[in-house]
């Protein structure tokens, strides 16, 4: 069959590929566990699904050339060194750390020469970047071989020590570190000068890292750099986790595409304990990629030469066609899910076959010895040299031998390149985030001006006139404050990226950052005229998990990127919870990697039902490490006043560190006549105000403390009331709250619009009680859902809320 495949013409190749696709037996042909005829094909191509005939012909022809063209001797010797390195390294770890869960890559050692060959195929004399997303299976071997990560550091880590400098945890224990299989590093190889290879950190949610890697790659491209994304999958995770589909749908979308991702499937033919028959419905785990017509090659992972040939083919295809390419490396895993797992409980027959196999390095060495390419002595010397190096590094796995920086701290891979000058140590210093009044007025007029060749929607024209009127009356609303913040940052050289579902218009038709001509649908975005920063406004696909991961990666690439992702409604962010938990809230603490991602979550009880009311602020507050800590992990605010929103966005960029920012944004408050700010609150020498006191009319006997839209309800409903509005929740302005409460000297009543069992109260209660003892609470009755789905029930609860507040007024 292999001989026939090699000599086939294009039409025959197409027939062969379709035949294998229909029978579902490609794995049977390339599976190393089948003990099939050594002359049977070790690689198969699927390209019949490509509809562009010229592209399909190119793929068939280049594939045929690749499998028929012998590799140069130097390439084969390099591959031998790499698979031997991977195999020797894995054996060494198993000997020294037999009970350590390292998620061995044995059975997939050819992943190392695969990735190296991709780097070679992509490399040019020009500066470029390769962003590598890889989960834990086989990662350590890639880390120390391809990435040249110091072995002594890795051994130190595996021994249970931390690679975070003690100095950054001196005053506040903030950086808990992460396990070895989640390590990241950026490196340059001398023979690939000019190519930066960035291996990203990964959480144990196997596939979500791909969205982050894609976002980071796009950020580099938008900075004018050459960049490519390489994503290593497990077969079961690829087929089972929906984020892969979400990200794949981005492949050809204008504001998300990266010029083609190279996908490598480390196909163990098993997921945890489930085999293929119970792990997916499609014949192949790679069938997903047919929706973007990506070529797929299935290759025996023990056939190192074929793996390398397909790696070169993948980079050539991407360069030519700008699309994704998939290399499905069909191999096995030597041990169970981890090294202390016994796989024979659930897969006894598979592991009988695996126990009979030599490692990839051993098999490849025997192949080259048989061909007379190398001698057994050469192989023995190669192995002994690698073992000597491992032993020497193991002996130096001690703090005094680990690489240090110029401050004699443990050297970390953070705060390099474009992040130089930023600090891992946060502070609570207030930022003078105001902006020149004359410049603000120019931006204001710019965003209200429609060019002559754009016929704006009639309602939009009225809104723009109203926006201009707001400036004359010195009453700036929320959407305008947002555009002023973005425009002023663009003028100061920051890049701004706003992403989400329908963010150009805004869910509530409030933003209108761009105008669509009613005759031509031409889009005009006034802020795009500002420089030197670049503006990217992205109406995203209907995805939360994939898109938020992408935006996190985009923000992580460069501290000069203000990246804002807006949920259509705040609770829609529930679909992106793994990104929020494992990256946004804890990424810096685990990995010393900062991100200035801003998440906008429309929030408020307005009778719209359980899935359109609450952003679930209590969930984000539960992720806060310590609301009084300088080293806060995540900044959270639920803001009423437009000027405060303006200052939050600007201060997040103007300080010398980055932290994620979550903002509960208004819905009805977008157009509330009380939710406005004067221009004086935006200009130079102004800053964010976390606590606002309002004694309306004659005030009230008790002081009502609240956060969010309920503040506007109180001012609207009660002519005489004393209110303290907490605009920022983390960091909590405790001292300012304490000073004002004690100065006012009234009993405190906490008011919230949410049900009593959710919302901010559970978070803020212990801090209020520290200030003033027992606190009375006004809230809706506890609910299992976040809001009532009945408008009548909502009104009844609202009336009861007001009644209870009235009882505390006098």
Image (spheres, grey):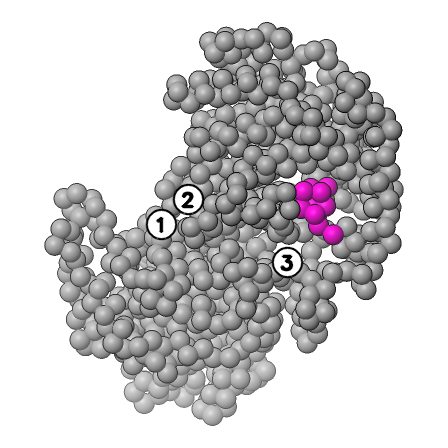
Q: Where is residue 510 in the image (x, y as percent from the top left)?
A: 27, 59
> Residue beneath label 1, please?
538
**Looking at the rendering, which quadrant does residue 708 occupy?**
bottom left
Vertical comparison of 74 with 694: above or below:
above
Position of 671 compared to 648: left or right?
A: left
Instruction: Name the quadrant of the C terminus.
Output: bottom left
* Real-space CA distance between mark 2 and mark 1, rounded to the nearest whole angstrom: 9 Å
Check whether the beta carbons of the residues at disc 2 and disc 3 lie within 8 A of each other.
no
Residue 576 is at least partly visible in this image: no
> Residue beneath label 3, please?
413
- Neighbour tally class for label 3: few under 14, some 14-19, many 20 plus, Cα within 10 Å: few
Instruction: Name the quadrant of the N terminus.
Output: top right
* Real-space CA distance between mark 1 and mark 3, rounded to the nearest whole angstrom: 31 Å
> Residue beneath label 2, please?
256
Check whether the beta carbons of the residues at disc 2 and disc 1 lie within 8 A of each other.
yes
Pick the front one: 2 or 392: 392
* Real-space CA distance between mark 2 and mark 3, rounded to the nearest whole angstrom: 27 Å
Residue at image coords 43%, 64%: 663
């Amino acid at each position: 069959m292999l001989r026939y495949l090699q000599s086939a013409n294009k039409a025959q190749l197409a027939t062969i590929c379709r035949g294998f696709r229909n029978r579902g037996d490609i794995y049977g042909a390339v599976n190393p566990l089948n003990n099939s005829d050594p002359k049977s094909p070790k690689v198969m191509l699927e390209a019949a699904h490509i509809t562009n005939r010229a592209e399909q012909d190119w793929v068939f022809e280049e594939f045929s050339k690749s499998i028929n063209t012998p590799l140069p001797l130097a390439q084969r010797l390099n591959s031998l060194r790499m698979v031997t390195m991977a195999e020797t390294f894995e054996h060494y770890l198993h000997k020294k750390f037999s009970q350590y869960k390292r998620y061995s890559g044995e059975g997939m050692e050819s992943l190392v020469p695969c990735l190296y060959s991709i780097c070679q195929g992509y490399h040019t004399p020009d500066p470029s970047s390769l962003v590598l997303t890889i989960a834990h299976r086989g990662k350590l071997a890639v880390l120390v071989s391809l990435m040249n990560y110091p072995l002594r550091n890795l051994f130190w880590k595996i021994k249970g020590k931390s690679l975070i400098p003690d100095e950054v945890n001196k005053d506040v224990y903030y950086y808990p570190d992460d396990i070895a299989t989640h390590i990241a590093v950026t490196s340059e190889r001398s023979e690939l000068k000019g190519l930066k290879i960035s291996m990203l950190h990964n959480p144990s949610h196997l596939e979500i890292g791909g969205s982050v890697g894609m976002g980071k790659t796009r950020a580099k491209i938008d900075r004018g750099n050459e960049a490519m994304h390489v994503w290593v999958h497990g077969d079961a995770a690829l087929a089972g986790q929906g984020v892969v589909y979400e990200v794949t749908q981005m492949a050809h979308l204008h504001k998300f595409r990266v010029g083609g991702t190279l996908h490598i499937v480390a196909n163990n033919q098993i997921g945890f304990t489930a085999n293929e028959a119970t792990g997916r419905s499609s014949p192949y785990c790679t069938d997903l990629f047919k929706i973007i017509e990506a070529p797929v090659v299935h290759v025996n992972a023990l056939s190192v030469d074929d793996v390398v040939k397909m790696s070169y083919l993948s980079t050539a295809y991407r360069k030519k066609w700008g699309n994704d390419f998939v290399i499905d490396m069909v191999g096995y895993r030597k041990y169970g899910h981890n090294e202390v797992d016994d796989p024979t409980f659930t897969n006894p027959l598979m592991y009988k076959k695996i126990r009979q196999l030599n490692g990839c390095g051993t098999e490849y060495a025997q192949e080259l010895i048989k061909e007379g390419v190398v001698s057994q002595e050469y192989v023995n010397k190669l192995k002994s040299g690698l073992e000597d190096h491992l032993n020497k590094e193991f002996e130096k796995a001690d703090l005094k031998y680990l690489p240090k920086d110029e401050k004699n701290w443990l050297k970390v891979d953070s705060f390099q390149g474009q992040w130089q000058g930023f600090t891992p140590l946060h502070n609570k210093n207030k930022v003078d985030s105001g902006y020149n009044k004359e410049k603000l007025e120019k931006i204001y007029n710019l965003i209200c001006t429609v060019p002559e060749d754009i016929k704006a929607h009639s309602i939009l024209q009225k809104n723009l006139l109203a926006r201009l009127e707001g400036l004359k009356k010195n009453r700036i609303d929320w959407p305008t404050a947002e555009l002023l913040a973005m425009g002023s940052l663009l003028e100061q050289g920051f890049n701004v990226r706003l992403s989400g579902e329908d963010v150009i218009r805004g869910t509530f038709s409030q933003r209108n950052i761009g105008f669509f001509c009613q005759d031509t649908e031409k889009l005009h975005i006034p802020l795009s005229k500002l420089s030197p920063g670049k503006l990217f406004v992205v109406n995203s696909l209907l995805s939360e998990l994939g898109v938020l991961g992408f935006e996190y990666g985009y923000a992580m690439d460069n501290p000069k990127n203000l990246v804002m992702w807006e949920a259509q409604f705040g609770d829609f962010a529930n679909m992106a919870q793994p990104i929020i938990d494992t990256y946004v809230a804890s990424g810096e603490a685990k990995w010393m990697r900062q991100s200035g991602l801003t998440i906008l979550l429309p929030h408020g009880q307005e009778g719209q039902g359980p899935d359109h009311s609450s952003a679930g602020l209590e969930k984000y507050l539960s992720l806060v490490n310590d609301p009084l800590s300088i080293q806060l992990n995540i900044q959270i605010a639920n803001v009423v006043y437009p000027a405060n929103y303006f200052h939050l966005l600007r201060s997040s960029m103007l300080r010398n560190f980055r932290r994620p920012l979550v903002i509960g944004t208004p819905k009805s408050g977008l157009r509330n006549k009380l939710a406005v700010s004067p221009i004086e609150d935006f200009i130079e020498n102004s800053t964010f105000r976390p606590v606002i006191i309002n004694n309306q009319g004659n005030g009230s006997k008790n002081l009502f403390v609240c956060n969010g839209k309920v503040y506007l309800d109180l001012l609207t409903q009660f002519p005489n009331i004393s209110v303290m509005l907490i605009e920022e929740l983390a960091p909590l302005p405790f001292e300012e709250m304490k000073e004002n409460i004690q100065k006012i000297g009234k009993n405190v009543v906490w008011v919230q619009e949410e049900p009593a069992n959710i919302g901010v109260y559970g978070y803020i209660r212990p801090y209020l009680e520290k200030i003033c003892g027992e606190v009375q609470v006004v809230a809706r009755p506890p609910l299992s859902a976040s809001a009532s789905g009945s408008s009548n029930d909502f009104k009844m609860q609202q009336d009861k809320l007001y009644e209870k507040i009235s009882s505390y007024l006098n």
